[in-house]
Image: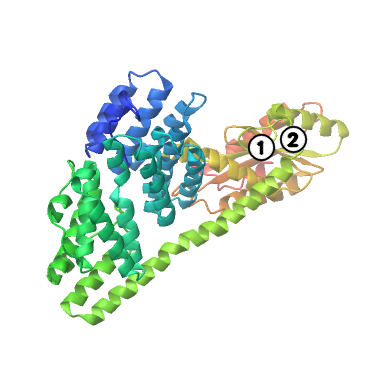
């Protein structure tokens, strides 16, 4: 997902790192980026080099190193005149990372944001690379119609650019994934036609180095479906200066497809025995589809039928997360609609938290003064997310912000109509319960913690469940909010410290 040197696109530090990426020299690109980042001071140059480094990390599958780079790029972009094209590329790469990490929700959210940023860049040559980045990510996710449309934008822009720009726009992996997806679905003739057009239109000289392996796979896959006439397929499958995992997968699958075309099914089946599609993202149905073709050549029709059934199963399974995302998306939208209704009366920005839309500390203090003056029993609760630092460390601060937004929505919909919720700072929330005694506060605290923990966080923050600990203390009208907050905060922290976990019954302490 890279461009090449072109004065119409960029120059300087970003170009130096990107050149190495285009040649599949990703380790060298990362090392150079680190040296440049230690010396650069201009925020836009820093942003560009960070994007080039992120692209290299993704290509090397070094996912653990991506969150701090994403956070640093986002920080560099704030208020520094980053163009819509660059912002679009940032979201495309963030979407790519989210999908590799297993979060389809975050992936689609970033894709939508990236597409919005790129809407006004139809004739801007700087948008060529971002549109290709969008196309590749759409293709990885399986949104092939969107991928083809994004590549179409890039191709249109490339006509006014350099030869290198046109090489970037060719990017055969997008059409290869589309073609194999069509074949897996049973639209074999359409798949063959797409591969035939690609092979007639694009040659090795029309591509950047890292894309030649996909052209080789297009030729091998076309041959496995009965196509003829392409020369140099094995040489293309050997492309790539570094044996990174994507090339390794393409090579094995491509040689299996060639063995099928050459009526050597036993060789193909041996190659497919431990073949994967983790990095090429050709779909989990690709390996069984090739097995089905190999068994058919071998004359083992029962095994071919069984493999074809697995193809159908994998295609159905691939659709399930999209259906789940649709349902979850409606749920999230309703949550935020409820949150907006809850905070609609807090229109003064000076009293509203900019991230969650909840009242901030200043508004909290004013509200508590008002209800303390009215008399009656009031309980003050302090809620803190458990192990929230792990979310930021493993997934990045942008995901952490999304978790805070979602927690705000969950708490808002779970509380009673007269209760008051504020974000105090960081991952700390304050809950004000008017006309409530200790026993009822315990019940509400249970309900709030259970609602946060019961939410399915596996897509937004895979592997890091989110939960909350709450402590409550009564509000003394004389001592005021500060004393009640201190007491509630101590109870909350005491609950967290017991056995190093939050699971001890904190309710005994309020």
Using residue 173 as the reference point, say whether residue 497 is left or right of it: right
Q: Nearer the viewer, residue 472 or 194?
A: 194
Circles 1 and 2: CB atoms closer than 8 Å: yes
First in residue order: circle 1 vs circle 2? 2
Q: Nearer the viewer, residue 22 or 242?
A: 22
The kind of secondary structure element at disc 1 is loop
Where residue 506 sits in the image (x, y, percent)?
A: 62, 44
Residue bearing mark 2: 346
How many neighbours does mark 1 have within 10 angstroms: few (below 14), some (14-19), or many (20 or more)?
many
Query: Quarter of the image containing the C terminus?
Result: top right
Confirm whether residue 263 shows in the render.
yes
| Quadrant in which residue 502 is drawn | top right
Using residue 384 as the reference point, say whether residue 291 is left or right of it: left
| Quadrant in which residue 225 is drawn | bottom left
Q: Nearer the viewer, residue 178 or 361?
A: 178
Where residue 84 sits in the image (x, y, percent)?
A: 48, 33
Q: Residue at x 19, y 64 (%)?
A: 223
Cα gap from disc 1 to disc 2, whole angstroms: 8 Å
Q: Nearer the viewer, residue 309 or 103?
A: 309
Q: Residue at x 25, y 72 (%)?
A: 292
Residue bearing mark 1: 357
Which residue reaches farthest front? 160
Check residue 345 in the rendering and tell me which mark sits there, or answer none.
none
Using residue 411 as the reference point, say whether residue 1 is left or right of it: left
| Quadrant in which residue 278 is drawn | bottom left
Using residue 124 as the reference point, say whether residue 363 is left or right of it: right
Where residue 7 sits in the image (x, y, percent)?
A: 32, 27
Compared with residue 345, is residue 333 higher up or lower down, i.e. above or below?
Answer: below
In this figure, what is the number of numbered marks?
Answer: 2
Where residue 26 sits in the image (x, y, percent)?
A: 25, 37
Q: Residue at x 24, y 50 (%)?
A: 202
């Amino acid at each position: 997902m890279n461009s090449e040197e072109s004065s119409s696109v960029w120059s300087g530090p970003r170009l130096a790192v990107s050149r190495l990426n285009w040649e599949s020299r990703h380790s060298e690109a990362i090392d150079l980026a680190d040296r440049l980042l230690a010396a650069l001071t201009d925020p836009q140059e820093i942003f560009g080099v960070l994007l080039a480094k992120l692209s290299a990390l993704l290509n090397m599958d070094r996912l653990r190193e991506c969150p701090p780079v994403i956070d640093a790029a986002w920080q560099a972009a704030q208020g520094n005149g980053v163009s819509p094209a660059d912002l679009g590329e940032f979201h495309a790469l963030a979407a790519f990372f989210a999908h590799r990490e297993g979060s389809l929700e975050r992936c689609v959210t970033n894709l939508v944001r990236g597409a919005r940023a790129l809407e006004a860049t139809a004739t801007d040559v700087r948008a060529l690379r971002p549109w290709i980045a969008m196309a590749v990510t759409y293709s990885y996710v399986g949104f092939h119609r969107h991928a083809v449309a994004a590549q179409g934008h890039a191709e249109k822009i490339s006509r006014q650019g350099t030869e290198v720009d046109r090489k970037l726009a060719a990017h055969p992996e997008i059409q290869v994934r589309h073609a194999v997806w069509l074949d897996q679905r049973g639209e074999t003739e359409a798949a063959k036609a797409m591969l035939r057009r690609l092979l007639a239109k694009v040659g090795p000289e029309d591509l950047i180095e890292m894309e030649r392996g996909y052209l080789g796979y297009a030729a091998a896959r076309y041959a496995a479906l009965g196509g003829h006439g392409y020369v140099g397929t094995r040489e293309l499958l050997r492309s790539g200066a570094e044996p990174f995992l994507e090339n390794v997968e393409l090579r094995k699958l491509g040689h299996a497809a060639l063995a099928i075309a050459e009526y050597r099914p036993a060789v193909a089946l041996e190659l497919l025995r431990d073949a994967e599609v983790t990095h090429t993202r050709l779909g989990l149905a690709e390996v069984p589809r090739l097995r089905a073709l190999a068994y058919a050549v071998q004359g083992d029709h029962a095994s071919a039928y069984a493999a074809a059934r697995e193809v159908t199963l994998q295609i159905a399974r691939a659709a399930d997360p999209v259906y789940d995302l649709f349902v979850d998306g409606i749920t999230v939208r309703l949550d935020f609609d409820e949150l907006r209704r809850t905070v609609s009366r807090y229109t003064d920005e000076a009293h509203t938290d900019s991230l969650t839309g909840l009242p901030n500390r200043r508004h909290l203090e004013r509200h508590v003064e008002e209800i303390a003056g009215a008399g009656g029993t009031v309980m003050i609760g302090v809620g803190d997310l458990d192990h929230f630092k792990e979310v930021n460390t493993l997934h990045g601060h942008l995901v952490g912000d999304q978790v805070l937004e979602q927690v705000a929505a969950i708490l808002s919909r779970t509380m009673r109509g007269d209760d008051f919720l504020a974000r105090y700072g960081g991952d700390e929330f304050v809950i004000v319960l008017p006309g409530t005694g200790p026993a009822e506060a315990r019940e509400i605290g249970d309900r709030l913690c259970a609602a946060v923990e019961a939410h399915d966080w596996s897509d937004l923050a895979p592997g890091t469940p989110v939960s909350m600990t709450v402590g409550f203390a009564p509000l003394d009208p004389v001592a005021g909010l500060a004393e009640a907050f201190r007491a509630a905060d101590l109870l909350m922290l005491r609950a967290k410290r017991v056995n190093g976990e939050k699971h001890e019954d904190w309710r005994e302490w309020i």
